[in-house]
Image (cartoon, grey):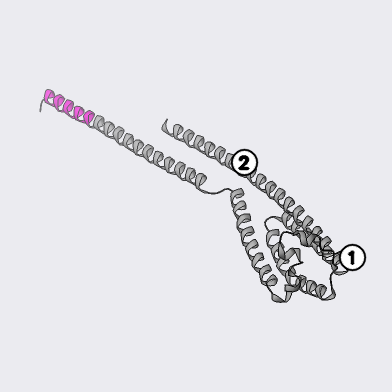
Amino acid sequence: MDAQQIRNCTAKYDSGISMHKRNFRLNKFEYLNSIKRIAEALRSLITLQISLTLALAVGACSTNAQRQGDLIRETGTAAHAENAACNSAVNNNAKYDKIAARDPIRTGAATLAQLSDELLITREEADLLIAWQSEIQPCRDKYIATIRAVVPQIALTREEAGSARDAVFVELIERKISWGTATSKIRDINSQTAREVTSEMQQVTSQLDRQNQAELEQRAIALQNFTNSVNAISAAAAQ
């Protein structure tokens, strides 16, 4: 092989090597671009999934204030129903029929006849009233204990009202006041208690509303901060 042939073979070899290197660089570049595109697609999918999950969690989960409100309503409803059943079982006992017409607790709203009753209690009526009170007391105690767990201020108001009614019954049993005066006092106690409970329940509701709004605002801020962080991470990774 002469010198010219050797040069020609060398040139072809160098040309082949150059083409191979160029093809390798192109393939490597395309491969890296493919990996990058796949990574960006996966990152977008993960970001979308996390954002959707967080958004659904924020919208679907109730706030602490809402759960507390639900607990108060459910507990109060159950306690009222149980207390009413307990009271009915005692009040419907036939042995108390003799004082039923005069007892403002059993008859509900005071009538004109009850308010104007000037008679003092008899010994028999006093014994019946004492027996009735001893049977009705456990109903009241259980009711107050139940609502104290969720609305302690209202439980205290109910407890104080019960004590005030007991004091009236003591005066009645001791023949210091008439049936009519006792009825009038208990009516006033019941009216005052109803106003206080209504006011206290409105305060509880307002407080829970404020707490609920604050929690929703905090969630919205947290979601926005998270979204901003994800966007910043995605932007930095794309560079």
Q: Position of residue 143 (x, y in %)?
A: 69, 63
Examine the image and state in which quarter residue 32 appears: top left
Taking the view exactly as shown, the residue that stands out farthest to the top is 4
Magenta region: 1-19
CA gap between label 1 and label 2 equals 55 Å
Q: Is residue 41 above or below residue 130?
A: above
Please, what is the three-letter code of the amino acid marked with disc 1? Lys
What residue appears at the point 73 percent right and 50 percent down from the top-left corner? Answer: 195
Q: State which quadrant residue 206 falls in.
A: top right
Q: Of helix, strand and loop, which one carries label 1?
A: loop
Q: Nearer the viewer, residue 41 or 104?
A: 104
Residue type, mark 2 in image: Ala
The circle on residue 160 is: none
Secondary structure type for disc 2: helix
- Residue 87 appears in which quarter of the rendering? bottom right
Please name the residue that numbered disc 2 is placed on: 214
Was residue 173 drawn as part of the magenta stretch in this picture?
no
Q: How many marks?
A: 2
- Tell whether label 2 touches label 1 (CB within 8 Å): no
* Main SS of residues in magenta: helix
Q: Which mark is residue 176?
A: 1
- Name the residue rendered at 84%, 60% in the picture: 181
Percent across and percent down for residue 55 are 48, 43
Residue 89: horizontal and vertical position, in percent? 66, 71
Task: Bin the neighbour count of mark 2 within 10 Å (Cα to Cα): few under 14, some 14-19, many 20 and up.
Answer: some
Mark 1 or mark 2, earlier in chain: 1
Q: Position of residue 213 (x, y in %)?
A: 60, 41
The foreground one among 121 and 56 is 121
224 versus 151 height, above or below: above
